[in-house]
Amino acid sequence: MLQYLIILLDDASTSYCHYENTARGKGLIALKDVRQGIFFAMKENLMIQFVYPDYVLPEAYHKAIQSIDHSDIVPATCEDKRLLEEAEVIVLNDWKEAERIAWREDACYVLRTTKSEWFANYEQVGNALGMVQRMNVVITDIDQFTEEDFATYKGVLSSLSDTLEQLYVEGKTPQLNLLTDRMMLKQMNNCNAGWENTTLAPNGQFYICPAFYHAQPMDGTEVSIGEECKKGFSIGSLTDGIHIQNPELFRLDHAPLCRRCDAYQCRRCIWLNRKTTCEANTPSHEQCVVAHLERNAARELLNNIRKHGKFLAETPEIKEINYLDPFEWKE
């Protein structure tokens, strides 16, 4: 059941997830589509998340946006300083931005990084954790992980776990999606694109998520995610409404592997699924292993924090497991 509507305000609106947005220049959504999108959200009782480009929008757009409760997702390079000071989510698209930014304790930050940059610079995140409320790290090339990368990632998580343990001992409670989310969750908390949220793009069309919009050329021609997955990705329009073929495929209860999994923090990214396995509800080996490495590191962190008298009752146990990929599970 839909709960959120994501509205991309421009073709160049910042990416905040695994997908790349290579659009350059202005491709501003029509003001009438913003208003119609807001009206659609009101009719369907949906919360709106606006995703911004890095330039200052015309004042008429701000007036329309302020007419409804919403959240703002803004790039750290945004020229609208007032927006940067008030946005709920600030997106860092490279490590230089992380070095220059003035951290806000009341904001959530999204850091998008490749695996190689992450392995080389992750200590910067450890330094920032004491200054922010929440940090979401998004590794943009998870599908390229190798067995060597898995081993490196495990070490990185262990190091960040030590940092978080010390902060919790000091009475601070920063959130890092890779580690602390699994400690708090009692059930799956995934992206759920296509089921709990959908996206309105600057062309007035609806998409499962922003990734499916940015995957196709701006002229609307068909594209492919791999040679076997060619199709158009629009699922409707403001005029015709939303029409998803086989909507059950986007639900957790129709995902044979994921519905039995307890890596509750996993994004269960539909885009990565489609890209790597050509199935909406089947994750890749890489996505599963990364999620289970995070799960196991969260288990160790929780146990270590409890040694200091924290999280003694309200946080559920995380069981030990003997696999990283469900296909490798053994009795």
Image (cartoon, rainbow, N blue to C red):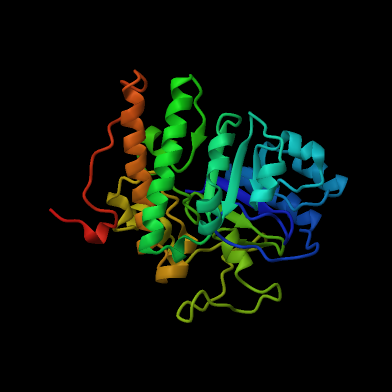
**Residue ID at (56%, 55%):** 117
Left or right of 331? Residue 112 is right
Left or right of 191? Residue 8 is right
Residue nearer the viewer, 331 or 63: 331
Where does residue 232 sit, x and y in percent of width and height? 57, 74
Residue 186 visible: no
**Residue ID at (35%, 44%):** 295
Where does residue 54 sit, x and y in percent of width and height? 77, 52
Using the rendered view, name the quadrant where residue 151 is placed. Answer: bottom left
Residue nearer the viewer, 313 or 216: 313
Give the residue furthest to the left: 331
- Above-or-below relation of 4 to 324: above
- Above-or-below relation of 77 to 66: below
**Residue ID at (59%, 35%):** 128
Where does residue 228 sit, x and y in percent of width and height? 45, 80
Where does residue 299 sit, x and y in percent of width and height? 32, 37
- Above-or-below relation of 208 to 301: below
Give the residue furthest to the right: 59
Residue 22 visible: yes
Q: How many marks do you count on the picture?
A: 0
Left or right of 330? Residue 81 is right
